[in-house]
Amino acid sequence: MSTGRLVTGSVPAPRHPLPGPPPEARLVIETRGLTKRYGAQAAVDDVDLHVRAGQRYGFLGPNGSGKTTLVRMLLGLVFPTRGEIRVLGHEVPRQVHEILPRIGAMVEGPAAYGHLSGRSNLDLLDASGPGRRSGRRRRVDDALERVGLAGVDRRAVRTYSLGMRQRLGLAGALLTQPDLLILDEPTNGLDPHGIREIRELLVELNEAGTTVFLSSHLLTEIEALCTDVGVVDRGRLVLEEPLDAVRRETGRVVVDTPDVDRALAVLGAAVVARTEAGGLVVVPADDSGAQGLAAHLVGAGVRLDALAPEKVSLEDVVVKLTGPGSDRAGERSGGVRRP
Ligand SMILES: Nc1ncnc2c1ncn2[C@@H]1O[C@H](COP(=O)(O)OP(=O)(O)OP(=O)(O)O)[C@@H](O)[C@H]1O
């Protein structure tokens, strides 16, 4: 819900301002040379980010790689040391007040008053928006409904589970029907059921027109949800591509069969490896690809459980591109693993 306190004070004029309204209106977030230094350390280092309208953009990196710092800069909560930021066509931090009403954000976990009910928290948040006197009840009802908290809206937030608090945070982010959602690790601490619920909600919102930008250290989460991925390593953006382009086909085919010996005899040297699950990794002999291979095997009496083109995994790409982060927590299963 709350994104924390806005940093106030004089805003330094950018040295190389971005030109007028963005020529590419579909660019919802754009940064150039974005850098944040803490003493000698660059938490974010010369990052050029491009998030387009309609994307579900996953910002992926090991713990300590600079994700939260970048997210906070996008929202004007931390000032850059150098570089430029444009969000929804406005310069940040200089024009951040223009865009905040159009953004839903959840950064560093949901913040809420524990002694108040979920509904009261949303009422307060809604009241803090500009010119929002009418229709509050409907807006709050709708937000509670969408995140599945309608039945517990009168309970004090201190009695909520972490998952319920995360969903309340999202409800807060939804109050404005935002053009852009910016979420920092939105599924932190949730069980698989909760993660799936949040994912479905984000897809639904995205399909209704909201651009979603979320940071995560969880490969599986990004892979399941996002259309595009940016990978950050020690403050630097090392990859920015559509997920489909990352997960390109390798030209090899994976064959799962109960008749392994027969398949090996039929395929001979075309079998170049075995998968962890025991499948055969095959280089097709001609350019008929997976379909030709399937026909060949079935014709030779080999039964097939599955046969599909092999794809590069996001994990393979990320492991090649990233080094050890500033802590080692990303080594846990499903996270960004180190080589
Ligand atoms: N206010 C600060 N003062 C000094 N160093 C900081 C500050 N904020 C962040 N850092 C450092 O900047 C680096 C990036 O931190 P950041 O929290 O942005 O990474 P992250 O990718 O979000 O990590 P996590 O996934 O663990 O939240 C870290 O080394 C961190 O210690």
Image (cartoon, rainbow, N blue to C red):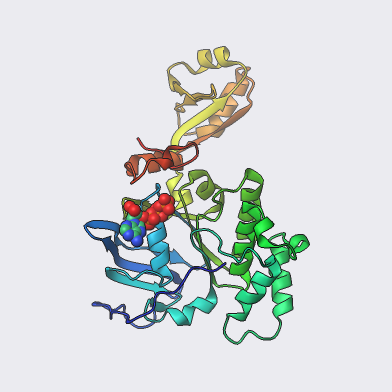
Q: To which quarter of the image does residue 47 belong?
A: bottom left
Using the image as rendered, state which of residue 208 and residue 165 is in the foreground.
165
Name which residue lies at 50% across and 24% down: 276
Name the one closer to the observer, 63 or 270: 63
The one nearer the camera, 261 or 221, is 221
Q: In the current view of this chain or complex, which residue is farthest to the right?
A: 151
Say above or below: 252 vs 30. above
The one of 113 and 104 positioned closer to us in this rendering: 113
Which residue sits at x=60%, y=17%? 300
If the picture is divided into quarters, which one holds ligand 1? bottom left
Q: Residue furthest front?
A: 115
- Count of numbered badges drawn on the protein: 0
**Residue 239 visible here:** yes
Image spot of residue 213 (x, y percent): 49, 62
Furthest residue in direction left, as rendered: 40
Does residue 327 sit above or below 126 in this rendering?
A: above
Residue 199 in percent (x, y) is at 61, 54
Assign the C terminus to one quadrant of the image.
top left
In this rendering, the answer to whether 109 lies above or below 306 is below
Left-right relation of 122 to 49: right
Residue 284 x, y percent position in the rendering? 46, 28
Residue 207 seen in render? no
Measured as percent of width and height from the top left, residue 73 is found at 38, 68
Q: Is the N terminus in the top left, top right, bottom left or bottom right quadrant?
A: bottom right
Q: Residue at x 74, y 71 (%)?
A: 141
